[in-house]
Image: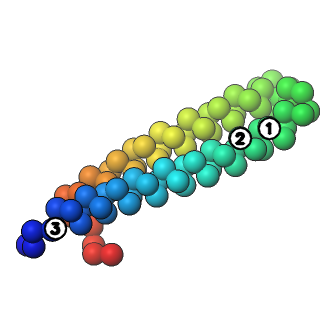
Amino acid sequence: MPWYAPFIRALRAGIYLATHVLVAAILIGAIYVVQWLLGYAGDPKLFDWIPIRYIFDAMDAGILITFIVFGTIEAVRAFQGNTPDL
């Protein structure tokens, strides 16, 4: 194992985390834009029962939780060297 192998693994882990953060930010930004556009309609409700705002908040939370969990798992795997070479 060369002396720079830990640095390569750390770089790979950082790339995984940065990629997950970027994709999550794009998805949350897209959700925010759609929510903002629907905001002009007042406070729309799904089936006149659930405010659309709650659904968008749940989507934001779901995306954040999913990307935090899977991003961390992938970064740990990359740091341990359990991923195939890029």
Provide the residue designation for mark 2: 32
Horizontal and vertical percent position of residue 40: 90, 34
Considering only vertical position in the picture, is 70 above or below 50?
below
Q: Residue at x 85, y 26 (%)?
A: 43
User: Quick one: label 2, few (<14), some, or many (20+) residues within 10 Å?
Assistant: some
C-alpha separation, residue under disc 3 versus residue under disc 1: 46 Å
Provide the residue designation for mark 1: 36
Secondary structure beneath dot 2 equals helix
User: Quick one: label 3, few (<14), some, or many (20+) residues within 10 Å?
Assistant: few
Quadrant including the N terminus: bottom left
Horizontal and vertical percent position of residue 27: 62, 50
Q: Residue at x 17, y 62 (%)?
A: 6
Callout 2, which amino acid?
Tyr
Q: Residue at x 70, y 49 (%)?
A: 30
The part of the image, by quadrant, that contains residue 59 is top right
Callout 3, which amino acid?
Ala
The part of the image, by quadrant, that contains residue 77 is bottom left
The first of marks 3 and 2 along the sequence is 3
Provide the residue designation for mark 3: 5
Secondary structure beneath dot 3 equals helix
Horizontal and vertical percent position of residue 8: 23, 66
Position of residue 22 in the picture relative to residue 68 (left or right): right
C-alpha separation, residue under disc 1 versus residue under disc 2: 6 Å
Callout 1, which amino acid?
Trp
